[in-house]
Amino acid sequence: MSAPTVDYETVGLTVEDGVASVVMNRPEALNALNMQLKEELADVWRMLVDRSDVRAVLLTGAGRAFSTGGDIKQMDPDRGPEVTRQRMAKLLRDTVIPLARLEKPVVAAVNGHAHGLGLSLALACDIVYAGESAILSMAFTRVGLAPDGGASYFLPRLVGLNRAKELMFTGRRLSAAEALELGLVSRVLADEELLPAALELAKELASGATVALGAAKRLLNESSMHTIEEMAELEAFGQAVAMSSEDHREGIAAFAERRKPLFRGR
């Protein structure tokens, strides 16, 4: 059954079978991220944190693009560096970081173009599927911009520092196949199979042990910033929380009874 959702102008949102399907919906602008789209995405992430009926998220774009990045029409070189800095900090604080830290699995289905900030959003997700015709790039320098949207954080962690520099400095476009080879995406599918496959994965994750998955996501996200001793302490904390969950009890019962567990996400 589909749960009631908020109506947005630039974001499509439906919830069904534990999956929140979030669709950037400015197809006429190739889902370029203007202020309204950024703000509506930020509102979606805030809402999904507390929705117990949502146990996984699918993010994609309407039409022939995932997102071509920030909306050039709203960029103003005369705005001044301090105002721009504040706007960019808000973008990270409200639109990107909450997506990366959402303690529920997030699957991105990259259809068509994903450039600049659009690619940053995809990389903030946990698992990225791409259609075979997808084209990806860190396009910032091609319009005289430095990276944003967390690109400087996500990219080197996925491809290594030197390769990240090459991709960032040149802004060259990658095919889906090369993106897969570099580790930017997890799987490449025929365009017509992309959304069904990504949705199937999101539903599979939504039926999993949500508390344990959330803990695993947080631990993996933290792993590059801590020593092994610090990670062991964080793992002990995460495991203590997971062991007290109803899903853990169900997992033990299902194992003993030799059946598939029926996790309820709590």
Image (spheres, rainbow, N blue to C red):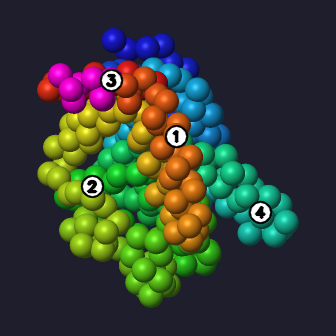
| Residue under numbered circle 3 | 250
Q: Outermost residue toward the front?
A: 256
In this rendering, position of residue 89 left or right of residue 212: right
First along the sequence among labels 2 and 1: 2
Give the amino acid at mark 4: Thr
> Which residues are drawn in magenta?
250-257
Q: In this orientation, which residue lies closer to the viewer: 39 or 230?
A: 230
Bin the neighbour count of mark 2 within 10 Å (Cα to Cα): few under 14, some 14-19, many 20 and up: many
Bin the neighbour count of mark 1 within 10 Å (Cα to Cα): few under 14, some 14-19, many 20 and up: few
Q: In this orientation, which residue lies closer to the viewer: 189 or 57?
A: 57
First along the sequence among labels 1 and 4: 4
Q: Which mark is residue 240?
A: 1
**What residue is rendered at 28% in x and 52% in y?**
129
Q: Which mark is residue 84?
A: 4
Is residue 248 positioned above or below 29 on the image? above
Look at discs 3 and 4 and give the one toward the viewer: 3
